[in-house]
Amino acid sequence: MNFATITAKLDAYERLIRLDKPIGFMLLMWPTLWALWIASRGQPDPMMVWIFILGSVLTRSAGVIVNDLADIRYDGSVKRTRNRPLVTGAVSRTEAVVLGLLLLAAAFLLVLQLNTLTIKLSFVAVALAATYPFFKRFFVLPQAYLGIAFGFGIPMAFAACLNLLPPVVWALLAANIFWAVAYDTEYAMVDRDDDVGLGMRTSAIAFGRFDVLAVMVCYAAMLAILAAVGMQLHFGVYYYLGLAGAAAFMGYHYLLIRGREREGCFRAFRYNNWVGAAIFAGIVLEHYMRSR
């Protein structure tokens, strides 16, 4: 195997696990970091932060392999996915399965550095990630299930820091579910025509002509829950400035999606990274100013 062949194969692996499109692991990472900073009162163990960030990359990468294996019969019929490595044959199914197992093994080695409760929760996280792709076949709002899967770093972070799951965990998870429905509806609006033809279930199809309204309502619900969390934890102005920043980005998303054009909807989806980052910045700044 010559150098060019090896380079082409590595490029195909990179595209398979979406390292060229980091938005996926960022949407997984931000809620986890919110939880780590809140659970540790702004002073997380640096090694624990590293474990959860790298774990987000590894588990998301394994998750998209499962997704592509589940959707291999359909992706060739969708404009956005027809050139994915499994569809084109650049990566074989066997190669994809082996790579996915290696990624999960690496993620599990990271989790083994944490306490028993976190290790137990990691099995739930894997089950959620593995079953999500199949919910698109029958569940009318698979984005809600995605919100649980992408938000499961929240209970794991609290378990790692506190070895228990206080009520705030479930409030944060609920906020993440609304967020996931919002951003993944924007994503689904890109593929709506293709998904209708393939018989897929997505929130963009379920909401129909109320899709834009539904996205904004979900954003509002997310912010309302996070505001309530702030009140419960007696957070101050810096936290709410972070929420205000997130709200500003959400307002911009409305401008991007109101015309329901593919490019605008996809941009709005990708810009959700800044929503998560704004909220995280507010949490970090709130704890930093408290510690002064």
Image: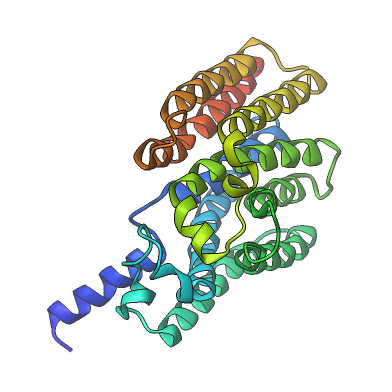
Where's the N terminus, which quadrant? bottom left
Residue 281 position, x and y percent, is 53, 26
Which residue is drawn at the image coordinates 13% and 77% (left, top)?
A: 4
| Image side of residue 43 versus residue 263, left or right | right
Tell me, what colour scheme is on the image? Answer: rainbow
Q: Decide which of 265, 209 is in the foreground and name it.
A: 209
Which one is in front, 111 or 231?
Answer: 231
Residue 284: x, y in percent? Answer: 58, 26
Q: Is residue 135 left or right of residue 11?
A: right
Residue 292 can be seen, yes or no: no
Residue 153 vertical position relative to residue 211 in the rendered view, above or below: below
Is residue 127 something that shows in the picture?
A: yes
Residue 252, compared with residue 108, is above or below; it is: above
Q: x, y (%) of residue 13?
A: 34, 71
Quarter of the rendering containing residue 283: top right
Task: Decide: is 188 above or below 268.
Answer: below
Q: Residue furthest top?
A: 237
Image quadrant containing the C terminus? top right
> Looking at the picture, how far across and down is residue 36, in whole percent?
65, 40
Q: How many marks?
A: 0
Nearest the eye: 144 or 15 = 144
Residue 229 horizontal side relative to residue 106, left or right: right
Which of the 4 image quarters holds residue 221? top right
